[in-house]
Amino acid sequence: MRVEKSIYLDYQSTTPVDDRVMQAMLPYFTDSFGNPHSASHALGWKSSDAVETARAVVASTVGALPEEVVFTSGATESNNQAMFGVMFGNTTPRNRVLVSAIEHKCVKESALFFGNKLGFVMEEIPVLSTGKIDLQAYQSMLSDDVLLVSIMAVNNEIGVIQDISCLSDLAHRAGALFHCDAAQALEAMDVDVADWGVDLLSLSAHKLYGPKGIGALYIDSSIQNNFPALIQGGGQQWGLRAGTLPTPLCVGFGVAASLIQSEGEAHRSALRVLSDRFLERLSNEGVGFRVNGDRQCRHPGSLSIELIGVDAESLLMSLQPKICASTGSACNSGMIQSSYVLRAIGVSEESAASCVRFSLGRFTDESQVDEAAKLIADGVRSCLI
Ligand SMILES: Cc1ncc(COP(=O)(O)O)c(C=O)c1O
């Protein structure tokens, strides 16, 4: 995708709204604006039908029942709700919560925050240099005092895919519940909550060519009775999440999910080809690089690479506005810090400063990949430290 003069290679950060999604949403901003919770008139019924249709599609996309899917404002809220619901609703003596070392901050921080407030100890499960969970360490951490395990399906920085069925099975054997942050998953693979054996699963529409501001939390029906809502109010969504639902956003999420169902696999194959082409072009241009994380088990459009000897921040600055991508660093309290994900897989501070995440998506094509590789190679030549 080109946005004015930019080649967009930051799809894991957010995706553009697909035009088919946009067209489906528009009437619900204007003519069909009724409150979906207004039970006494036709406009309300129309919105409610649209919301419930969308819920059914999102649910079927992950193999769930509609009544197991609660709309939220995004994966951040879903992850917070998962942590809060399990910890606040706990009636057992279990007091440990395990999250992987490479979880998104909204999992780590909410586990820590609610854990501190509610008397749980949060512990991090280490990963190997491939980015995969360290199974030996994980197994040794599991015992009958673990309440909840949270492990993401696809990492947002290095694109590594975890074996969720195996990990959830181990958690269940120890009697723990299993939550999976699947915000990045549907672009990369088919998701089925039953096959994966998860109790809770978080989704986000804006990673799927849907709108920002809407996500969902799958809550297995067997745990819903004892699952307090983070957002209290008018009892919408069976009391699991109060607040008037944004009909256009729900509709957009539903259409985005249905497009993934019908086009997902073809799209993933295309992404694999484009990613390989991008790396090949970089190599042909003489750029020295190393790919972070497992090469096989990964999101097909996600490439976190170390550009050897290059300062990634300076490179991306020099490429503005031509290329949109992300570096492996974040600005925390005014200090540039290397990403904890890269640190967790053993990347040194120095190498992390040379890492860029390029993420390709639905609207990336060969000409963009070729042009981007050329621009990057030119940039690297003038940026070598
Ligand atoms: C893995 C993962 N989890 C959670 C989130 C947060 O999602 P949202 O922006 O929908 O709150 C993101 C977004 O970057 C993500 O990549």
Image (cartoon, helix red, strand yellow):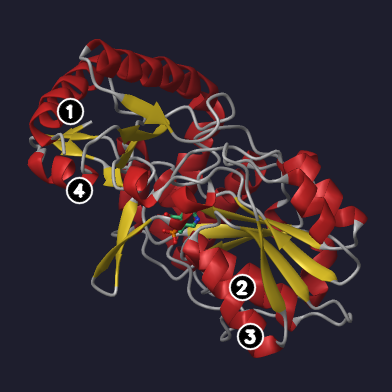
Task: Give coordinates of residue 174: x percent, y percent.
Answer: 90, 59
Q: Do the CB atoms of the residues marked 2 and 4 lie less than 8 Å apart? A: no
Q: Which mark is residue 376?
A: 1
> x and y percent of residue 362 in the render?
36, 29
Query: Residue at coordinates 77% horizontally, 80% vertically from top-left?
Result: 89
Q: Say whether marks 1 and 2 touch (CB < 8 Å).
A: no
Identify which amino acid the numbered label 2 is placed on. Answer: Ala
Which mark is first along the chain, 2 or 3?
2
Instruction: Say whether disc 1 or disc 2 marks the residue closer to the N-terminus.
Output: 2
Image quadrant where one finds the N terminus? top left
In-front residue for pair 241/151: 151
Name the N-terminal-most of marks 4 and 1. 4
Which mark lies nearer to you, 2 or 4? Answer: 4
Q: According to the image, label 4 marks what residue?
A: 313
> Is 117 left, or right, of 298 in this rendering?
right
Q: What residue type is labelled 3?
A: Asn
Q: Where is residue 41 in the image (x, y as percent from the top left)?
A: 50, 71
Lower sequence index among marks 4 and 3: 3
Residue 223 vs 184, above or below: the answer is below
**Which label was assigned to residue 111?**
2
Number of the label disc, if any, that sits on residue 195: none
